[in-house]
Amino acid sequence: MTDATPRARVGFIGLGSQGGPMARRIVEESYPLTLWARRPASTEPFADTAADVAATPAELGAASDIVCLCVVADADVEDVLLRADGVLAGMAPGGVVAIHSTIRPDTCRRLAEEAAKREVAVVDAPVSGGGGAAAERRLLVMAGGRDADVARCRPVFETFADPVIHLGPLGSGQLTKVLNNFVFTAQVGLALDTFSFADRLGMDRAAVAEVLAHGSGGSRAAAILAASGFDTTGLERARPLLLKDVGIMREVARDADVPEPAALDRLAAHALSLLDAPPTP
């Protein structure tokens, strides 16, 4: 992109712990940015930026060439896109919707069919790494969609991500993301068991964690657990999302008539049971 090339107008919906830093990186790179949120408080942190705030998703769509969605679940994506005052009601033909939420691949394809009626393209672009990685421009984006559509979005994605990996047709990004989270959940179970086993053997779990960080037996889950001081609170909070993504992976396998990998599935189920903290009285 040269200085003479107009920058795409970007809309962003979903300003939580993940989406907020992504949106800030976009506006900090001087892209014209429009925001919408159900709660006005979500847009307040952007008061010090050039971002505009739309009154409705449709108004945001009308002001955007590319709309990025980072809401939680399938129903949330459907709502902001398809409701009477949704993004697609306002977006002009030729626009692109990038779905950063982790949802079912079939949902992406169905929404793409609806968007195509308005001559709007859809790219699925789920992310991994967390808000801190987005702020440091090292988030991972797993993209699926037509080559031209992904290429059009890539400069925007690169404001907060490295790498941006185009995995194939629409739905490929979602499929890869839920596989990633399926493996991560299994690793959580393995890490929890590993440190408990070390305790029973009378080992210093902090020293074990340091060895694993440099050895072949380490994992991202073990590193996260060690960095938290072996506090599982964060992982317990993440349990509903991990449960959702493991469920999607199982649905995909069932629909494709592909047996789930037994060892991974057992470890994932074990991790979810360990993270199922008793309800607060």
Image (cartoon, helix red, strand yellow):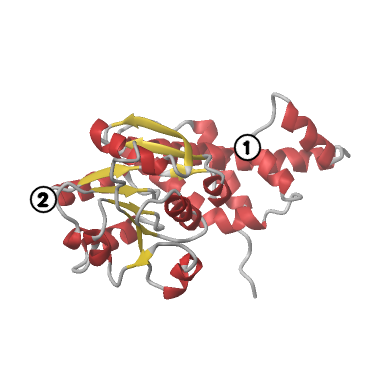
- In the picture as drawn, the residue positioned furthest to the front comes out as 4
- Residue 183 in the image, given as x and y percentages of width and height: 52, 36
- Residue 252 in the image, given as x and y percentages of width and height: 34, 39
Reading the image, the residue beneath label 1 is 220
**Residue at point 29% right, 48% down?**
8
Q: What residue type is labelled 1?
A: Arg
**Depth check: 46 or 234 in front?**
46
**Residue at point 47% right, 73% down?**
41
Quarter of the rendering occupied by the N terminus? top left
**Depth check: 53 or 116 in front?**
53
- In the picture as drawn, the residue positioned furthest to the right comes out as 202
Snapshot quadrant of residue 77: bottom left
**Residue at point 35% right, 30% down?**
167
**Residue at point 53% right, 39% down?**
138
Q: Reading the chain from its start, which is encountered first: label 1 or label 2? A: 2
- Residue 215 in the image, given as x and y percentages of width and height: 73, 25
From what the image shows, is residue 257 above or below residue 235?
above
Reading the image, the residue beneath label 2 is 117
Quarter of the rendering occupied by the C terminus? bottom right
In 3D space, how far apart are the residues under numbered discs 1 and 2 (Cα atoms)?
A: 42 Å
* Mark 1 or 2: the one toward you: 2
**SS for callout 2:** loop
Snapshot quadrant of residue 147: top left
